[in-house]
Amino acid sequence: MTNASPPGAASTAALKISCPSCGGSGVLRMSDQRFRTCLDCLGQGHLPVFEPQPSLQALIQRQEDQAIQPSADGLSPEAVSSGSR
């Protein structure tokens, strides 16, 4: 059994941004002898990187492009059929 990383893990490793609050340690120093988990990075030491999502306008445009196009006379069988048998 090997310890191979999952696909895509190498690309996300390069995108990790060190947490500016804790400096990448995941722990905040409260005083000389008090520490707590960094809540910005949840103790991981790096901030999560989110992939940009398509905008709502792009999603609506994609749905409109996939919609049924009307025939030349303006009526499609789907528009005039009642669906009853």
Image: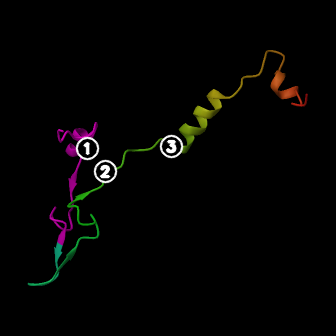
Local crowd at mark 2 within 10 Å, few (<14), some, or many (≥20)?
few
Q: Is residue 73 magenta?
A: no
- The residue under label 1 is which amino acid type? Thr
Q: Amino acid at mark 2?
A: Val
Q: Quadrant of residue 70?
A: top right
The residue lying toward the viewer, choosing from 49 and 42, is: 42
What label does residue 12 carry, if any? 1
* Mark 3 burial class by Cα count in 10 Å: few <14, some 14-19, many 20+: few
- Residue at the image point whose x is 89% and y is 31% from the top: 82
**Extent of the magenta region:** 1-27
Q: Is residue 68 left or right of residue 44?
A: right
- Chain-order first, disc 1 or disc 3: 1
Residue 8 point in image, percent of width and height: 28, 38
Q: Are marks 2 and 3 in contact (CB under 8 Å)?
A: no
| Element at label 2 | loop
Question: In the shown orientation, is residue 25 left or right of residue 78?
Answer: left
What number is the disc on residue 55? 3
64 on left or right of 26: right
Q: How many angstroms separate mark 2 from mark 1 (CA)?
A: 8 Å
Q: Residues within 10 Å of mark 1 (few under 14, many from 20)?
A: few
Element assignment for label 3:
loop
The label nearer to you, 2 versus 3, is 2
Label 2 vs label 3: CA separation?
A: 18 Å
Q: Is residue 80 above or below residue 34?
A: above
Determine the residue located farthest toward the front in the rendered image.
1
Amino acid type assigned to the residue bearing label 3 in the image? Ser
Magenta region, mostly helix, strand or loop?
loop
Residue 17 in the image, given as x and y percentages of width and height: 22, 53
**Displayed quadrant of residue 18:** bottom left
* 83 vs 57, nearest the viewer: 83
